[in-house]
Image (tube, rainbow, N blue to C red):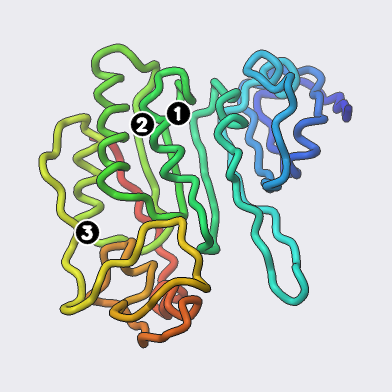
Amino acid sequence: MLALYLPPSNKMELDLSIKDLFDLYIHPSQFQRVTINFHWQEEILCPSYWNADYVSKTLGTVTEMRVSPLTAYSGDELQFRRPSRILPFLNSFVYLKRLTLIWEKISESTCVDQLAQHLVDPDFLPELEALSISEYPVWPDFFQCIQQRQTGFLTGRFQAALKEITIRGPVHGTLLEHLRESLTGVYIGPFNMPPLRSGSKEWPAQPFGCKELDTNGLLCCYVCHKAGLEIACMISPSEVAEEMLMCDKYELNREFNTILAP
């Protein structure tokens, strides 16, 4: 157990690994605002004592969190540890208002869709107001979950409504408009993705294995497909799936799209 004895303060920011976080005890723990930036390790399981009472007692009122993958090398290849077990970990941060999930590398699993499904639970991150993600969700399901959360607040089932959502990457304007409508909590009706390239087949949903993926008929990169930007994709079709994941446009355009609730 690592104990930190700090002078009284209204806010504090920590930057550490998740192993350190599990063993940390802050004295005093009565900070009004705690921001945590930490690196996730996939092999880590939450200890049995990890719950809302324990987090509040040892870390204080954690209101902001930024989670990024722990990087490691396997031979010459950089590996990113992804958060396959992050939801039980997040569930204990009942005062969290701002959450940022950063996973820059595309691989065989995503966490944003799992997160979205839990957002419809009034007991999951009940005070969450701002969400920032770098992965593209399954859009229709994501819109529906956001809408249900906002409707739950309007009917008194949720403590807080989402005030902003940030997509850390290029997104078709139609998708951003649907996201804006979802944040109103109003039914947005039938949803259609932006048009595909003429003759292009749709990419499969994740998880998929790149080594076994058949790219025949795929005329755009995976990122442009998920962002609704197939027509503007700059990729040259290839039989090697790893070469079809991301085009040069994504590398050059690191825009942030933030949608605010009305």
Give the answer, above or below, for where 54 lies relative to 85.
above
Residues at marks 1 and 2 touching, judged by CB atoms closer than 8 Å? yes
**What number is the disc on residue 173?**
3
Circle nearer the N terminus (2, 3): 2
Q: Position of residue 213 (x, y in %)?
A: 44, 72
Looking at numbered disc 2 in the image, what kind of residue is underneath it? Leu
Residue at 36% x, 87% y is 236
Crowding at dot 1, Cα within 10 Å, few <14 / some 14-19 / many 20+, comes out as many
Q: Mark 3 or mark 1, which has the lower sequence index?
A: 1
Asked if 154 appears above or below 36 in the picture, the reply is above
The CA distance from mark 1 to mark 2 is 6 Å
SS for dot 3: helix
Secondary structure under the numbered disc 2 in the rendered image: loop
In this picture, residue 13 sits left or right of residue 3: left
Q: CA distance from mark 2 to mark 3?
A: 20 Å
Q: Nearer the viewer, residue 135 or 60?
A: 135
Instruction: Decide: is 183 above or below 113.
Output: above
Tell me the residue that label 1 is attached to.
128
**83, 172: nearer the viewer:** 83
Q: Residue at coordinates 36% horizontally, 83% vertically from top-left?
A: 235
Q: Is residue 245 left or right of residue 43?
A: left
Q: Nearer the viewer, residue 28 or 51?
A: 51
The residue that label 2 is drawn on is: 162
The N terminus sits in image quarter: top right
Which label's residue is closer to the chain start, 1 or 2?
A: 1
In the image, 61: left or right of 236?
Answer: right
Q: From the image, which quarter does the C terminus lie in? A: top left
Of 172 and 245, the residue lying toward us: 245
The amino acid pointed to by label 1 is: Leu
